[in-house]
């Protein structure tokens, strides 16, 4: 996968977003924990985060930690954010072996 590439793959029962971020292959759930909208088109940030394109919740792609929870739209975002408690983004271990990309079936968290 070239740098900046992203793909969605079925891993067991889950749709997993696989990204090449600065030469590192990372894998996370393709569903935002806030409202389950897809993250595939989310903005990848310079500090290895991803921002949901819908309510702008932000997560660390390496740890899944929440960086920001539903700040958008202004004024209404915090109300929408309170509908669902803050949850980390599930992340998956990846490895490349013999030119194959392996993704764990279960998330790390």
Image: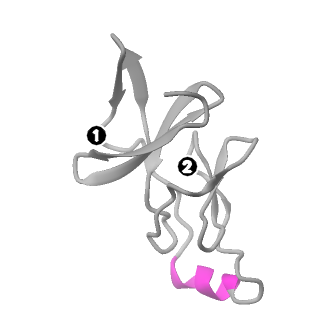
Viewer-closest of 17 and 85: 17
At numbered mark 1, what does the secondary structure look like: helix, strand or loop? Answer: loop
Residue 6: x percent and y percent? 50, 42
Residue 7: x percent and y percent? 43, 43
Q: Which mark is residue 38?
A: none
Viewer-closest of 16 and 86: 16
* 109 sits to left or right of 21: left
User: Is residue 106 shown above or below 88?
Assistant: above
Q: Which residues are magenta?
A: 77-84
Q: Can residue 109 be seen in the rendering of this structure?
A: no
Tell me which numbered mark, 1 or 2, is placed earlier along the sequence.
2
Residue annotated with mark 1: 105
Residue 39: x percent and y percent? 51, 58
Residue 96: x percent and y percent? 40, 19
Residue density around tag 1, few if under 14, some if 14–19, many if 20 or more, within 10 Å: some
At numbered mark 2, what does the secondary structure look like: helix, strand or loop? Answer: loop
Check residue 68 for magenta coloring. Answer: no
């Amino acid at each position: 996968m070239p740098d900046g590439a992203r793909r969605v793959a079925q891993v067991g029962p889950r749709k997993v977003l696989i990204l090449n971020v600065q030469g590192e292959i990372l894998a996370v759930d393709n569903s935002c924990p806030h409202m389950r909208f897809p993250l595939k088109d989310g903005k990848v940030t310079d500090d290895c985060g991803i921002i949901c394109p819908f309510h702008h919740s932000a997560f660390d792609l390496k740890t899944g930690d929440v960086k920001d929870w539903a700040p958008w739209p202004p004024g209404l975002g915090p109300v929408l954010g309170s509908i669902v408690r803050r949850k980390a983004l599930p992340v998956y271990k990846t490895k490349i072996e013999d030119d194959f990309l392996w993704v764990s079936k279960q998330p790390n968290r």
